[in-house]
Amino acid sequence: MKTLRLILGDQLNIKHSWFKNTNENVVYCMFEMRQETNYTTHHIQKVIGFFAAMRQFASHLKTQGHELVYLKINDEKNTQSLTDNLLQSIQEHHIKSFEYIEPDEYRLDKQLRTFCKSLDLSSNVVSAEHFYTNRQDVANFFEGKKQYLMENFYRDMRKKHDILMVAGQPEGATWNFDKSNRNKWKGDVDIPTYKWFKNDVSEVIKDLQTARIKTIGRLDTKTFTYPITRTQALEQLKYFCEKLLIHFGDYQDAMHTDQDYLFHSRLSFAMNLKLISPKDVVTTVLNYYQKHGDNIHLSQVEGFIRQIIGWREYMRGMYWACMPAYKTKNELDNHNQLPEFFWTGNTKMNCLKQAINNSLNNGYAHHIQRLMITGNYLLLTQTHPDQVDEWYLGIYVDAIEWVQLTNTRGMSQYADGGTIATKPYISSGSYIHKMSNYCESCHYNKNKKTEDNACPFNSLYWNFLDEKRSYLKNNFRMGMMYNLLDKMNKQDLQNI
């Protein structure tokens, strides 16, 4: 009575209860498929990273004595379809039952549920055993409430899991140190060289070339620098605690031409593949803070943990609460095309040039580059959210739809009309100058609005407010800006 168990490419959790013991009646299966490489056009480093991590995970399972069917992208038996590969494995191994781990993407969840209904054998779905919350926790938390404020959810998570709490109250007598997390990095604090791994991925690259998989982005080496095993992910986490945590909160929103990563952890790829869990991360950071609290301010730790148990868990919950309708939301009725330079980085706007080239070169940009540089520009130029989603989902190594969609269509593009963000995250050039050194070497002048060399963000900002007045005029957080717009000289507004 053999059971087939499916492991998807973002389910590489070696600590999952499935793998505690070997069982001669269990066959595991993993597939590299065009179904997954082709549903959108991915960054070359993203595809390489997934396949390299999957192959390492498969090798580890076999070493532990588990029976495994692994189909590489060019294997002759590979049908390139998840369900067809599963049917093939069921027939070849005389399978009597099928099990899979709960997927984190709606499309895969739907595909597997439909597949199981078509089978004439028993099937079962189990927890990913990764997140703090289950799919429905966020929806249940906000049931009956008018707003889905992340801050309320975050505070509940702190209480529920006793994180940075003292006698039922937040440590430091405040829940949120966000105001301390907005410093501009001016080079006065040294940034350690980022932790990188020399993962030889030449075989994966060769296989992708043979398969002629279409990708975007750049790769000028045969190594992949992000963690692809749990051991490497734990090394990355240790390095973050020892070298970067001390200033993470201070500069988490900062941007600089000489620094791609600043004090960020670079753990999101490993976390989203489930090589390492959020509990691993939070527990390790808290333990390090307790031992070194004299040197590390609470604001650094709280700012980081808020991203893990706040935003990450919240975004996943909102994804499952709002899908599938969420994927088609376009509440601001934006329809313009994504600019061509988002695929090349060839623009005179230095902030966009820096953020886009970082994305193309490294498959990476931190949250403020994504939100307030590329996302800000695409919203102000009223780009269709479908095209925005496609770019973000493809360009980043850590991009999986459950976390990408809510951050992009909701937080960044306000296409959900305010379900996630209470106002559009837009700004003129002044914010970019405040948080970076991008403006100092830019072709455009951050202080001008309508001249030939004026920063495009300035005119785009006021133009957007004017054009979207009917959608935003009643938003209480936008009142001050509309008061300023109303007081603007009519000729100046026409020039804008």
Image: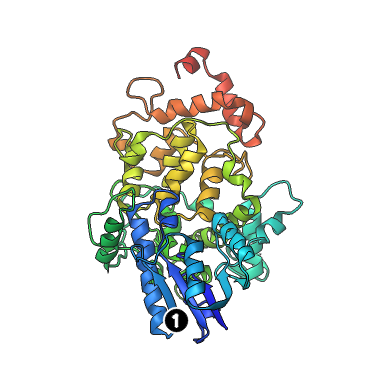
Please state which of residues 36 and 390 is positioned toward the viewer in this rendering.
36
Residue located 49% across and 12% down the image: 491
Give x and y (percent) for residue 478.
60, 33
The residue carrying mark 1 is 67
Horizontal and vertical percent position of residue 41: 39, 48
Q: Quadrant of residue 373?
A: top left
Q: In which quadrant is the C terminus drawn? A: top left
Tell me the SS state at disc 1. Answer: strand
In the picture provided, is 391 more to the left or to the right than 220? right
Residue that lies at the very extreme toward the top in this rendered image: 491
User: Split into 4 quadrants, where in the image is the N terminus?
Assistant: bottom right
* Residue 89 percent location from the top left of the image: 48, 72
Who is closer to the viewer here, 470 or 212? 212
- Foreground pick, 191 / 137: 137
Q: Amino acid at mark 1?
A: Glu
Instruction: Please report the residue visible at 62 percent of the width from the left and 55 percent of the height from the top.
Output: 320
In the rendered image, the residue lying farthest to the left is 221
Q: 372 above or below 35?
A: above
485 is higher (above) or lower (below) than 194: above
On the image, which quarter does residue 117 sit in?
bottom right
Does the image show residue 224? yes
Q: Which quadrant of the structure image shows residue 156? A: bottom right
